[in-house]
Image: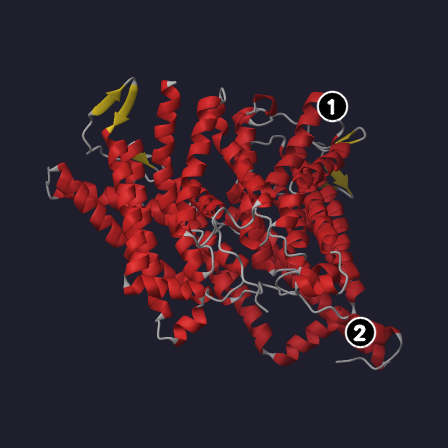
Amino acid sequence: MKELKLSLQDFFLILLCLLACCAVFVAFLLATNLFVLLAIIFAVTLAIYLFNRVEQVKSLITGAFERRGKFVTGTVIAILFLLPFVLRSSPYWIFILTLALLWIMVALGINVQFGSAGIINLGAAAFYGVGAYTAGMLATRLGVPPLVNLLLGAGMSVVVGSVLFIPVLKTKSYYLALVTIAFVMAFHTLLNNEEWLGGAQGIVNIPLMSIGGYSFLREINILGFKLPSQANFYYLALVLGALMVVAASRIWNSWVGLTWNSFNEDTGDELSAKCMGVAVNKWSMIAFTIGNFYIGLAGAFYAHMAGYIAPPDITFYQSLLFISAVILGGVDSILGVSVAAVLLVIMPEKLRALQQYWIILFGIILVLMLILRRKGLIPARIRTYGLKISRALGGPPER
Amino acid sequence: MDTIINQIINGIMLGVMYSLVAVGFTLFFGVLNLIQFSHGEIFMVGAFLGLIILNICHLVLGIENPVLLLFICFVGSSILTGLFGILFGRITIRPIKNAPPVIALLTTLAAGLSIRYIVMAFYPSGSEPQRFPAYLPDWQIDIGGVLLRFDSLFILAGGLFLIIGTYLFINKTKMGIAMRAVAQDRETAAMMGVNIDKVIDITFVVSGVLAACAGIFNGLYYRQIIFDMGGLYGVVGFSAAVIGGLGNIFGAIVGGFLFALLASFTSAFIPGGSAYRFVVAFAFLIVFLVIMPKGILGRREKRTA
């Protein structure tokens, strides 16, 4: 009986927290008044501060979240699934949320490269561009169906990425950063000047996403609710994004993630890893490839969602934005980079009124983050293999 | 043939500017052991400060003598950019002095981004190219069809002067010796009584002066400056420093000229190549880094435990 009460309390707490987060998020999206926005930001900051200060509440809530992992996942998925219903009167925000999902994919890709394996990639926009241009070219010239293009775009990004294998293995830190910067700048110039790739205009009129005969331009009718056509993209991105988040967190939790961390400059040491028999070069290449796959897939999806792709989207600045999602969120923390990716998409849209001042603010925030809170918004957890094993064996919970 | 020689001259001009920026990168790397990636933005700030000083002197104070104007412009912009460098260094570099390289790289990148857009937002109509007044005499020498403009000679002489000055400063003055000591071993230098923070400030001043002069050269040569020119110069200067070997001043100069000549030759010899000059240069850089990761004159890394 007591156990039932305890678990009910857990479920109630989790539901309350997640719904509150969701409500604040939606309110933030729909608010148009700058003062309301600032009030929400202030309230959230205050809530986080209090949450971290009041030890009792913190342990109660984090305990509930840790114990009921599956319930949390289920609730989050349900909430994400229901978001378009709440936002159905503003298709614009559904579009932005879809974009945010794509950014999560990109951020996860960079997180595998930079967060886990320590391969700094300041050329992520180039791989995003490879995915998008591949999808765009194949769709407009050869009429390849969009769903196939997603895979081909991601594959092409991997192939192009393999050009950089040798530099990635041979160079480190600054030198590698320079290589990737040079790569994205050269790629940008190429796109701007190659006529067969659309030149400065880019590729326009890319057919939008469709599966089989189902066009994504159609509105959805479920149970009398009418969802705008943007919800189609949202749901596909949600499915893909969820798959990729699950894949990324499984990899992170497995020995593969541990292997990457073992030779990462921040978390491990390459020389020691080599001595312990870790095939550093092989795993570097695998990390780089997986990351490029993620980024390329997001790029291909973007091409079929926006309907065009042009060189101004593929710049060093864009790469910097992508990698800052990883820095802001917390290096090697999957939850953190996802949250930061969403914030990085939504904040500029909300702060439209600030125009170019947004970039100034963004730079300052990034600098402050890097100086004051280097671990990011939600720092990476320590893996808890021992805890799980001891629980599985029925041992005492180590708390 | 003439176009080729003109391209070479153009390449040498570019080389002077790239070298001055690259020397800044290499100084930072030597002294701080990190890449100061917003150095391109300091170059841009130097150019804009020069322009502001020129405009104030000419329009407000009514100075007409071009020699005096240019002198005030160079000296004033150098001093202000040096001070700006100190301020910038104290705010962003000091807190991350001991951070891992990638963190330092991203911090300076982000700070540079802010600087760039601050200039764009607060300089009057800052998003458009600004006309840089031409105070250098217009005359040019015609040597067998090759036009040698006066401003080219001026920039070449100015660049040479600055490079020799930097060399003397680093090698002959007490502060220069302190800088080299810190570059060699920061902790030992500190124990010998070198004030590390002061050395860092001086590094910012020296590289700021070089960058400011390069920025004004750039303005005088192309007759216009724009807020985002620092981006390309930053990457190119860093590339040049890397090609020459980070930490080596002569390497940076060699790298700067190599990079500039490579870009110019691409424009000259490959038809329609001017659009691709940086593609070729960057491709060369990537291949070069694979073959010689430490650069042409790079210091060999000590294996530390």
Which subunit holds the residue at mark 1? A
List the single residue furthest toward the right.
A393
Residue B88 % position (x, y): 36, 58
Closer to us: mark 2 or mark 1? 2
Vertical comparison of A219 with A355: above or below: above
Q: Nearer the viewer, residue B256 or A144?
A: B256
Residue A143 is tagged as: 1
Give the side of residue A325 with respect to residue B65, left or right.
right
Q: Nearer the viewer, residue A180 or A290?
A: A180
Residue B242 % position (x, y): 49, 48
* Dot 2 amino acid type: Gly
* Dot 1 amino acid type: Gly
Q: Return the disc, 2 or 1, that comes first in the chain's sequence.
A: 1
Q: Quadrant of residue A253?
A: bottom right
- Label 1 sits on a secondary structure element that is loop
Residue shown at 59%/44% (left/top)? Answer: B291
- Label 2 sits on a secondary structure element that is helix
Residue A20 % position (x, y): 64, 63
Residue shown at 28%/17% (left/top)? Answer: B144
Residue A386 is tagged as: 2
Q: Nearer the viewer, residue B52 or B290?
A: B290
Colour scheme of the picture: secondary structure
